[in-house]
Image (cartoon, rainbow, N blue to C red):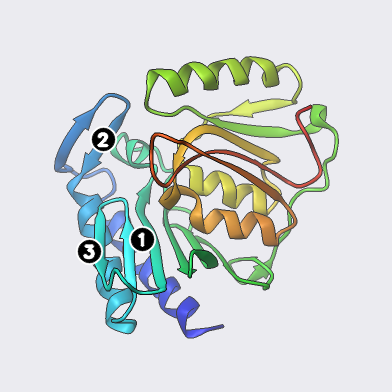
Amino acid sequence: MSEHLKIAIEAAKKAGVLLRENYETDLVVDALHDHDIKLNLDVRAQDLITDCLLTAFPDHALYGEEGIAGNLESDWQWVVDPIDGTVNYFYGIPHFCVSIALRHKKEIILGVIYDPMADELWAVEKDGLPTLNGKKIQTSSRDQLKDTVMTIGFSKTRESMDAGLQRYKEIAYKVRKTRMMGSAALALAYISCGRLDAYIEETISLWDVAAGILLVENAGGKIELTPVSSCEDKFGIVATNGKITFD
């Protein structure tokens, strides 16, 4: 295990403790948006992660959902979502996680996803095998669309929701079941270990999926990202176990 991965796991678990301690308590809401919520706890969790990572690697940059920090000229950039699934967290639905990735010269070289409620930790490094709680994992062997379970994410704008609904209608009849679970990072983590077979969303942010991209690809899956021209670091995503197509 590299020092980068060791510190990333430490940061994810520390943030996970904070999330568990505050789960189903009176939460401070910083902002309420259509289809989204911003919690003060998001900021606190990212601050904790930032302190852990940048204390260990002071020359690195950090790019997170709650802001940027560190040496912004660095070739090393941590990509962080302190609570992926904030709406679930706020409503007391125990499906959310901490997501941490490391990019070097724009290439993702490390990913950690931690579900603090289930105490499940996915980890991967470039050219390495992904693991779940230390055990090697791989994507499912299902190769027939009719046998698959997939998850759909619905984005926050009307345009992307309409596109997502249309795609959902086209796919739902072809698969065994669909799920809408509320965490992009966990969707990718679940694909990497064979619990799900695919995940589709029309618009998603880099920090939601950076760690999961490397997990899925190194576990045998396939990721297709389509940049959203109007928004930097936002993409449409189609992630699969690497064995199915939607044609």
Judged by depth in the image, the label closer to the viewer, 1 or 2, is: 2
Question: Residue 229: percent from the left, percent from the top?
Answer: 45, 36
Dot 2, crowdedness within 10 Å: few (<14), some or many (≥20)?
Answer: some
Residue denoted by label 3:
47
Residue type of the residue flagged with mark 2: Ile
Question: What element does badge 1 sit on?
Answer: helix
In the rendered view, tell whether residue 196 sits above or below residue 166: below
Distance Cα–Cα, label 3 vs label 1 = 13 Å
Q: Which residue lies at the image location 14% right of the left edge and 43% below the top edge?
A: 28
Residue toward you, 97 or 107: 107
The quadrant of the image that shows the C terminus is top right
Residue denoted by label 1:
16
Question: Residue 181: percent from the left, percent from the top?
Answer: 50, 34
Residue type of the residue flagged with mark 1: Gly
Residue denoted by label 2:
37
Q: Which residue lies at the image location 34% right of the left edge and 82% below the top edge?
A: 57
Q: Which residue lies at the image location 45% right of the left edge and 72% below the top edge?
A: 9
- Disc on the earlier residue, 2 or 3: 2
